Image (cartoon, rainbow, N blue to C red):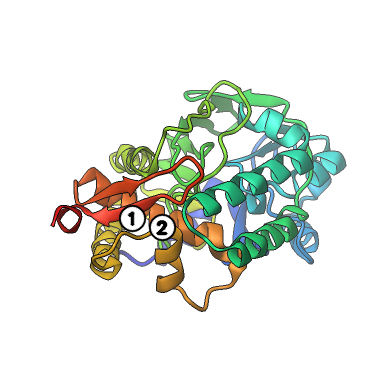
Amino acid sequence: MAAPDDDAIPDRLRELGIHRVSLPAANEMGRVNAWIVDDDPLVLVDAGIGDDGAIDALEAAFRAVGRRVEDLGLLLLTHQHTDHLGLAGEIVRRSGAELAGLAPLGPYLADFPAEAAADRAYMAELLRRHGADEAAVSGNEEGWARFHAAGGSARVTVPLVAGSTIALRDRTLELLHRPGHSETDVLFVDAAARAMFGGDHLLRATPSVSMRDRPLPAGDGARAPDPSEDDVAVTIRYRESLRATAPLPVDLVLPGHGGAFRDPAEVVEHHLAKQDRDAAGLLARAGDAPFTAGGLAASVWPQAPASLAHVLLSTVLGSLGVLRAAGQVEVVDAPAGGPVRFSARARARG
């Protein structure tokens, strides 16, 4: 793929009045981006997380462009994950800015501690259903509790839906809904500038995991809970979202992690191919006997901390979705209390 930061990108960002802010992420990603957009009103895309040093780094970034957090007029959120919205309440309190995001983020952020606790309960149920041991379940709960503690409640004052537009002095941003990495993933596209804020929908260096998030409270744009939905449907949704992004007339992507890059179509092609390779590798590793997704994750990453159990299970379920959609893997046992067992289709039929 093309270099993520060629010589022209910094000049392009300056011309557009866009400034990258790299903040501590408090998770396996290490750093997370927020983007200052020098417009009227002054805009920040994503809010980082309430980790040590994050607010200081954000204040320093505003000072570097001659502004203050208190000058902010609009905060845009790209999706529901805590490393992108954790500081939203503090930023809005200090600035009085409007807070805009996909409509389901409204009830989710209104009582964030309660919603985050429900997220953790959902993860525990999913891990048990897919054969994770209790050490992984409890370690995942502890890790996510620490992560969620760096977020807080906030009031979404501008609920958005697919196709919503945000008119600023120098640009208009259109919201495109791209569920897959999370239920609430969106793009903010500036068609005139051929640029988009991509959140975690499309990262260059690291493919986004199709996280098995709890369906959010009812709201325009939310997916209703459906216990029958499985890894195939979730995986297909994400791959369809990626394919819908590839032909956009955009040549500058401003992602949630890592540097800006030029060619979304090339990155989409790269990530879809990697998903296929990863799925094939997982199939080769699975062996002849029926297996659980949790057991397979533990065998692939035996030294991984338990706090990553849900991320790794989501990764494995994504690959199993690719394989099941291709008819290469099937569910052979799915009792109500779990665990769900899979098998390679040819092996299962022997």
Q: Residue at x 66, y 50 (%)?
A: 82
Query: Which residue occupies the foreground of this view, 350 or 59?
Result: 350
Q: Position of residue 189 (x, y in %)?
A: 46, 36
SS assignment at label 1: helix
Which amino acid lies under the numbered mark 1 shown in the image of this protein?
A: Ser
Q: Earlier in the sequence, mark 1 or mark 2?
A: 2
| Residue farthest to the bottom, as pictured | 303
Residue behind mark 2: 293
Residue behind mark 1: 319
93 left or right of 87?
right
Q: Residues within 10 Å of mark 2 (few under 14, many from 20)?
A: many
Q: Which mark is residue 160?
A: none
Q: Residue at x 59, y 72 (%)?
A: 305
Which quarter of the rendering shows the N terminus?
A: bottom left
**Residue 54 to residue 109: above or below:** below
Q: Position of residue 29 (x, y in %)?
A: 56, 65
Q: Position of residue 96 (x, y in %)?
A: 83, 35
Work out whether residue 60 can be spotted.
yes
